[in-house]
Every structure is written in structure tokens, then in C-alpha cells.
Image (spheres, rainbow, N blue to C red):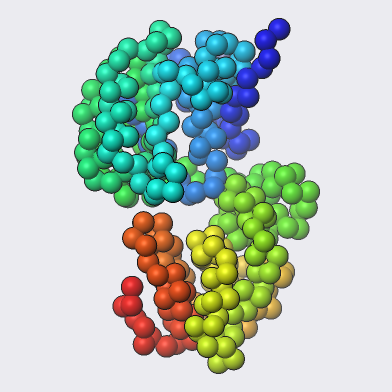
Amino acid sequence: MTERAAVQVPCVWHRDLLAELMQQATDQRLPHALVLSGPAGIGKLRLARAFLEALLCQQPQAGLACGRCQSCHLAAAGSHPDLALVMPEEKSKVIKIDQIRDLVSFFSKTAQYGGRRVALLSPAESMNRNAQNALLKTLEEPGAGAFLLLLCDQPSRLLPTVRSRCQQRQLGAPDAAVAQAWLAEQTGSVDSARALLAAAGGAPLKALALEQAEWFANRDRLLGQFLAVLEGRTPASIAAQTLLQHEPLPLLEALHGWLAQALRGQQHDDKLAPVMERLRQRAGDKRLLMLAAEVQRARQLLQSGANPNPALLMERLLLLLAGVDAMAGAF
Ligand SMILES: [Zn+2]
């Protein structure tokens, strides 16, 4: 008996959606191009890979790739000739136009295994304008058996001309109870699952990544830096340095999650409760709201590839909370 290939399975909360997509494919109702968008860390990539592998599989079972046929083995090995994965290359934040040209040429050929030709673009918004324009013709006339799956955290960054040529589906974070049960199973702790999900805005895979981040255990101390600046105990530049000993993006994402909860009057993380309560008392909700909006902006800047100065960015957030806007417009 041949060994079973390690085919991808979707997260438990995406099983029904995958079944639905596979049914569409069986009924030949699948569009040529589909945009799946939703927050980062909810398992879109797993869903996408499971879907594409099942589409290529010669004998899918219950809507999943069988893991035994030649297609499944090739897909798992990353060498299926009818499967193209287009992602930013190492260290790059963008999908380059050359990658899209290769993709256009991929779709100009016929399928080698007699079935579909499928491609995954992830995250699709990392294509710049030229790359997106280069894809338009393929989106319009992709050829027989072609299917393009575009994953997006921020669909607004796709050109309207791209969006209008694709069917679109918006995915949300999974139900909180389902996410918590899944995460507790992964981490072995129900209590930490709550706190992790709270920091990850309900996105379970992001929450799991946070568990591995060494700063998460010290999150009260890190949030405490904001309080220290607000109370005039620490200069913003020093607090910024302390915060920047860690990767800024996950930290800002977590901060945004905490602020959003605090503003809704919720608290899912006992470790943060005392610090957050004092922040609210000292700064007031209006300023916390402003901070949340600026944190969001800072996150987008860091993700955009614009290379902002992280120290300036962090310092500005700290000062903003303290009510000092001397650095407004600094980025
Ligand atoms: Zn198979």
C-alpha cells in the first residue's frame, strides 16, 4: 500500500464551507476566480490548500483530497504541474509582476493531468498595481478548467477591476466558543485560550502564534509601558525602546485587540485587567478610541511595505495616549 500523502485539512470551522465549495465544483457552478477575504489568522490558507488539493484529487472522499492518488502525492510534495502557488518571495512583501507573468503563462497551457489548472494567490493584495493589471486578462479569459483562488486580508487593496472579475466571499472569525475549544485543545489550557484569543481579535491561528511569542507572558509589563508614559514615570522614547525589543506588528495587533475590548467594556484577560482599568481611568475612553484608530493605522503602515520608522511610530502612539500631540503628522 502506498504511503498516504500529507494533504491539507481545513480548520474545523471551515469544514462546511469547504463542503459547499466542493459541491459547487461538482455541480460545475464554480466561478473562474474567487476572492476569499477575511481577517488574518482564521485559517484561510489551510482552507484554500485543502480546497485546491481536493479539486485536483482524482478520487476526493467526503470533499477532501484522498491522500493516496498521484495528484495528492504531487500536491503534497509541492510539485503538482497543475497547481501554482503565488506568494511574496522570501523577505519580499510583494507579489512581483514577473510572478504574475509566469502565472499567465501557466494558464496558457493545458492541464497535464487532464483535469483543472488551479492557482492560489496569497495574500492577493500584495500584488502591486502593475501586477494586478497583468492579471486582468487571465481573470477575464482564464481558459477551460482554470480556477484562481485569491486570498485577501484587506480586499480594499485589490483594484476594483480585479474585484469585479471575481466572485467574492467574506469570511469572519469563527464562533468564539468553537475557537476557544480548538485553541484550548492546542495549548492544553482553557484560561490561556481566552486571553490569547482576546489579543488576537478572535483569530485562532493568530492566537496560537501569540502563544509561541515570548513577549506574550510579559504582556502586562508591556501594556504597563503605556501607563508609565501616561503617568509621566517613563519618557516615551525609553518606553518605545522597551516595546521594540519585540516584533512590532504582532504587538500592535494585540494592543488593538485589547483596546477594542476595553472600549466595549469587556475583559477576557485577567492579567491585563488592572493595567487596562488604570489606563481607562487616566486617559478616558475618547483617547483610548483615538489610540485604537492610530494603532490600526500604524499596523497598516507596517504591513504596506512603506518601511516606516518603528521607533517613531511607537513613540507617537505612546505620546498620543499621554495627550501629547507634538509629533502629530510625524508619519
Ligand atoms: Zn487524491
Q: Residue at x 54, y 47 (%)?
A: 41
Q: x%, y% of residue 26?
A: 46, 15
Q: x%, y% of residue 9?
A: 60, 29
Q: Quadrant where the N terminus lies?
A: top right
Q: Nearer the viewer, residue 155 or 317?
A: 317
Ligand 1's image quarter is top right
Residue sitting at the far right: 188
Q: Residue at x 48, y 49 (%)?
A: 39
- Res 265 → quadrant: bottom right
Tell me if residue 128 comes above or below residue 100 in the rendering: below
Q: x%, y% of residue 320?
A: 44, 81
Tell me if residue 163 comes above or below residue 111 in the rendering: below
Report the number of numbered marks. Answer: 0
- Res 88 → quadrant: top left
Q: Residue at x 61, y 48 (%)?
A: 204
Residue sitting at the far bottom: 232
- Res 241 → quadrant: bottom right
Tell me if residue 258 comes above or below residue 200 in the rendering: below
85 left or right, relative to 128: right
Q: Residue at x 57, y 66 (%)?
A: 246
Q: x%, y% of residue 79?
A: 49, 21
Tell me if residue 277 comes above or below residue 14 in the rendering: below
Q: Quadrant where the C terminus lies?
A: bottom left
Query: Is any part of residue 150 visible from this angle?
Result: yes
Q: Nearer the viewer, residue 26 or 132?
A: 132
